[in-house]
């Protein structure tokens, strides 16, 4: 199973462990996840969407409005995603 | 009052209106906010932190774990922030 296939289950597992133990190891795993997802060209808005799905999974009674707020955050983050894509293509051109 | 000073109150106002009416106008205001925050060099992790503060404000009874999950999302988003800064400096160098 490659990184993209296991993205959601990995994120769920690391976030669950962070919420349970809130320690440096979980944060370190979060940073590692982040570096890998940048390498795999996962956009920032995909991370927001992933976070929202995992929260829904971990907390089935989460407030409806809090979930809806993620649709808004996703929209705001889309322009950052575009800027980030631009960054990738500028960097590729310079290599 | 400049954009950075009014950042939180603007975001709170736009998100509140989005959650109330969930319409295209609120989404459009979200996109406008996003473009302005990129122009003002607000990092993606600052947006996550802002979203979390505003949720706490709008929903004082939000689950503690959901709030803690934002600390984790913020950590994950930090590397995206660095990639984004790199993008800014590459672009500045090309101008």
Image (tube, coloured by chain):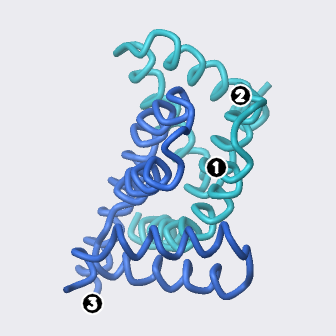
Chain colours: A blue, B cyan
The local crowd at label 3, few if under 14, some if 14 to 19, many if 20 or more residues have their Cα within 10 Å, is: few
Q: Residue at x 39, y 22 (%)?
A: B28
A25 with respect to A7 (left or right): right
Q: Residue at x 61, y 50 (%)?
A: B48
B83 with respect to B4 (left or right): left
Position of A34 relative to B34 (above/below): below
Could you tell me if the residues under marks 2 and 3 are in contact, i.e. CB atoms within 8 Å?
no
C-alpha distance separating marks 2 and 1: 12 Å
The numbered disc on residue B78 is: none
Position of A81 relative to B89 (above/below): above
Residue at the disc numbered 2: B59
C-alpha distance separating marks 2 and 3: 47 Å
Chain under callout 2: B
Residue at the disc numbered 1: B66
Could you tell me if the residues under marks 2 and 1 are in contact, i.e. CB atoms within 8 Å?
no
Residue at the disc numbered 3: A95
Residue B26's image quarter? top left
């Amino acid at each position: 199973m490659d990184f993209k296939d296991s993205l959601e289950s990995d994120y769920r597992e690391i976030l669950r462990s962070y919420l349970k133990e809130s320690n440096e190891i979980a944060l370190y795993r979060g940073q590692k996840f982040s570096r890998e997802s940048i390498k795999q060209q996962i956009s920032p808005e995909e991370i927001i969407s992933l976070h929202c799905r995992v929260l829904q999974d971990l907390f089935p009674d989460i407030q409806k409005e809090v979930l809806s707020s993620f649709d808004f955050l996703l929209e705001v983050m889309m322009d950052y995603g575009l800027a980030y894509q631009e960054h990738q293509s500028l960097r590729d051109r310079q290599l």
